[in-house]
Image: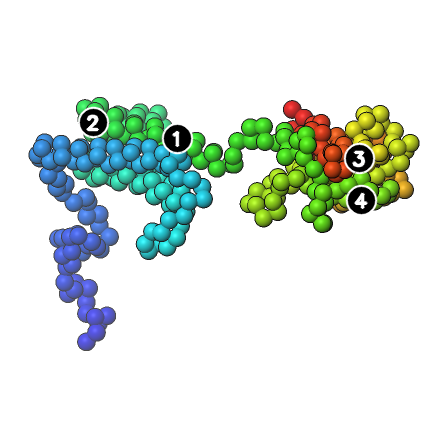
């Protein structure tokens, strides 16, 4: 006989107490209520509670030390230092130390908070009925009362060791974010205002890597130069050339309209920065009949016969000029640095 054929009054009464039906009833959906509260050892023994307090304080203190270690890593480890750490292999010492210390700082704050809640805060379960979303004045009063009761049960006012170490850990962790701002890049200082050009430095042809002489540059020709002593194999070559790249053209002296440009030239040979003053693109398109150079990025056009002023496009400033002359060996040399900072408007020459 199947269970469906058994009369309902003959079925046994379910005696579950933990889940499902309640003992002594045949209703499988009756509310069993909350289990009886079992006190923890910390609730019964103050020494155990003090041990938990010290454990929480220790974790908050470890978080503070880890945060200090995070900040110290910036001072101790250079950016290019590589170390071998098993099982990760060769890694950046700075990145590894930053990740390890910041992870430890956040972990110990979380672990301390969890241990505090599980051992010292009240663990009595409270059932609350559902209410409309809009809180009534009675509910608001109850929330504030519950908050006050929670603060009282947490013993944050009485257990000053936990409170003080927690505040210390929470106060130090945000400093990690402040230190991370250092990763935005090195401080520019005056590096953007100056280049490698200086009085007496010869102009080196970028193609032949030999010093340029006046006879090497004919009227209408375009040449590119770099400062003497700059090694193309050096690690900062591109950084330095991003400021010192030089464009050289020869114009008939009578065609030069700007007096200062004529004075800073040598027999019609003028030297201007190759870096566009719009967004820093390299300029290489020269029209010898008009003496105009064109930036290939956004078509800014400069007149090299009139102080490299802007005649078209979004560039906001003329190209900086380099004053040049000839040394005792007959080679072209710089007579100083550019007359103004090189590059993309340089914050409006601020």
For discs 4 and 3, the disc positioned in front in the rendered view: 4
The residue that label 2 is drawn on is 161
Q: Is residue 195 above or below residue 148?
A: below
Secondary structure beneath disc 4?
helix
In the image: residue 342, left or right of residue 184: right
Alpha-carbon distance for marks 2 and 4? 80 Å
Q: Single out the mark in the foreground, 2 or 1.
A: 1
Relative image position of residue 279 (x, y in whole percent): 69, 38
Left or right position of 82 against 240 = left
Res 248 → quadrant:
top right
- Pointer 2 with pointer 1, Cβ within 8 A: no
Q: Which quadrant holds the N terminus?
A: bottom left
Would you name the residue on which mark 3 appears? Answer: 270
Residue for point 86% across, 37% down: 251
Q: Of the residues tagged 2 and 3, which is closer to the observer?
A: 3
Rendered view: 217 above or below 154: below
- Which residue position holds label 1? 175
Relative to the observer, which residue lies in front, 304 or 33? 304
């Amino acid at each position: 006989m199947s269970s469906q054929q058994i009369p309902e009054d003959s079925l046994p009464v379910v005696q579950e107490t933990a889940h499902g039906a309640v003992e002594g009833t045949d209703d499988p959906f009756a509310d069993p209520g909350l289990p009886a509260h079992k006190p923890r050892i910390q609730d019964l023994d103050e020494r155990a509670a003090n041990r938990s307090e010290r454990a929480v304080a220790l974790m908050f203190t470890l978080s503070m030390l880890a945060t200090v270690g995070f900040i110290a890593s910036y001072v101790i480890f250079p950016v290019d230092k590589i170390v071998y750490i098993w099982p990760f292999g060769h890694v950046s010492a700075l990145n590894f130390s930053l990740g390890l210390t910041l992870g430890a700082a956040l972990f110990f704050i979380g672990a301390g908070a969890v241990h505090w809640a599980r051992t010292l805060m009240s663990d009595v379960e409270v059932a609350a009925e559902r209410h409309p979303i809009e809180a009534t004045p009675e509910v608001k009063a109850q929330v504030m009362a519950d908050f006050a009761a929670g603060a009282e049960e947490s013993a944050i006012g009485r257990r000053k060791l936990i409170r003080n170490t927690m505040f210390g850990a929470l106060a130090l962790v945000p400093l990690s974010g402040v230190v991370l701002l250092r990763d935005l890049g090195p401080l520019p200082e005056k590096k953007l205002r100056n280049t490698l050009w200086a009085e007496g430095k010869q102009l080196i042809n970028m193609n032949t890597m030999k010093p340029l002489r006046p006879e090497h540059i004919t009227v209408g020709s375009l040449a590119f130069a770099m400062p003497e002593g700059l090694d193309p194999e050096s690690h900062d070559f591109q950084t330095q050339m991003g400021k010192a790249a030089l464009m050289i053209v020869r114009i008939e002296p009578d065609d030069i309209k700007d007096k200062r440009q004529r004075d800073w030239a040598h027999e019609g040979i003028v030297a201007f920065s190759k870096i566009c003053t719009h967004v820093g693109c390299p300029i290489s398109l020269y029209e010898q009949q008009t003496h105009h150079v064109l930036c290939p990025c956004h078509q800014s056009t400069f007149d090299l016969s009139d102080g490299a002023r802007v005649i078209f496009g979004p560039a906001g400033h003329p190209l900086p000029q380099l004053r040049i002359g000839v040394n005792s060996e007959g080679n072209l040399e710089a007579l100083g640095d550019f007359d103004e900072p090189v590059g993309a408007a340089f914050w409006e020459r601020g």
